[in-house]
Amino acid sequence: MRLAIASDHGGFDLKVALIDELRSQGHDIVDHGPAQSVSCDYPDLAVPVARAVASAAADLGILVCGSGIGMSIAANKVHGIRAAVVQDEEHARLARQHNDANVLCLGGRFTPNERALAIVRAWLDARFEGGRHIGRLAKISALEG
Ligand code: RB5
């Protein structure tokens, strides 16, 4: 799968661990930065990943900041993006099954690496269920104008 990923300083270490693991699983990863753990503003990193997903340059995106919250707020400003902050595997599955979340946001300061890897696995393995959820997502898309 083609995955776009980025972090700020609060999510940098977790991002590096995720990239290593996801590459070893055979995923095609584009790292949108930063290259080092330097203080930076999460919207600057969220938007390139969100645009890569919205334009279909990437299949899905992963964003990591301290809490995951700032990344999700910024990513959700990009049309076509459904970014979800997730802290456990069950929410990861639901984010895909019900909400067709195309960007996963994680909190590097709250989510240990092993749990984050399990969350990403659960999210990648889950599938959108369609059905009654299609109309609900259409109502969200309609808000984008
Ligand atoms: C950076 O200190 C922190 O605010 C950021 O990583 C993130 O948690 C924002 O939501």
Image (cartoon, rainbow, N blue to C red):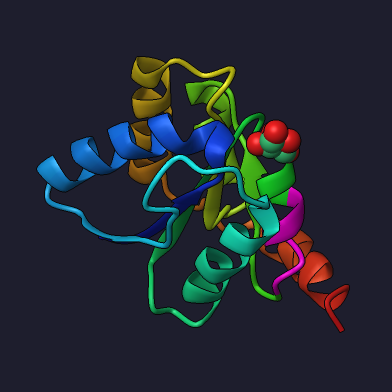
Q: Kindly identify the residue that appears in the image at 77 percent across and 73 percent down.
A: 141
Where is residue 36? Give x, y as percent. 39, 45
Q: Is residue 145 left or right of residue 87?
A: right
Q: In which quarter of the image is ligand 1?
A: top right
Which is more toward the observer, 24 or 98? 24
Where is residue 77? Give x, y as percent. 77, 66
Confirm whether residue 132 shows in the render. Answer: no
Confirm whether residue 109 shows in the render. Answer: yes
Image position of 136 with respect to 114: above or below: below
Which is more toward the observer, 16 or 116? 16
Where is residue 136? Give x, y as percent. 77, 60
The number of callouts visible is 0
Looking at the figure, which quarter contains the N terminus? bottom left
Looking at the figure, which quarter contains the C terminus? bottom right
Q: Is residue 142 left or right of residue 44?
A: right
* Residue 56 falls in image quadrant: bottom left
Q: Kindly identify the residue that appears in the image at 70 percent across and 72 percent down.
A: 78
Q: Give the range drawn in magenta.
A: 73-78
Q: Is residue 139 left or right of residue 32?
A: right
Image position of 124 with respect to 59: above or below: above
Q: Kindly identify the residue that appears in the image at 42 percent across and 25 percent down.
A: 116
Q: Kindly identify the residue that appears in the image at 37 percent across and 52 percent down.
A: 35
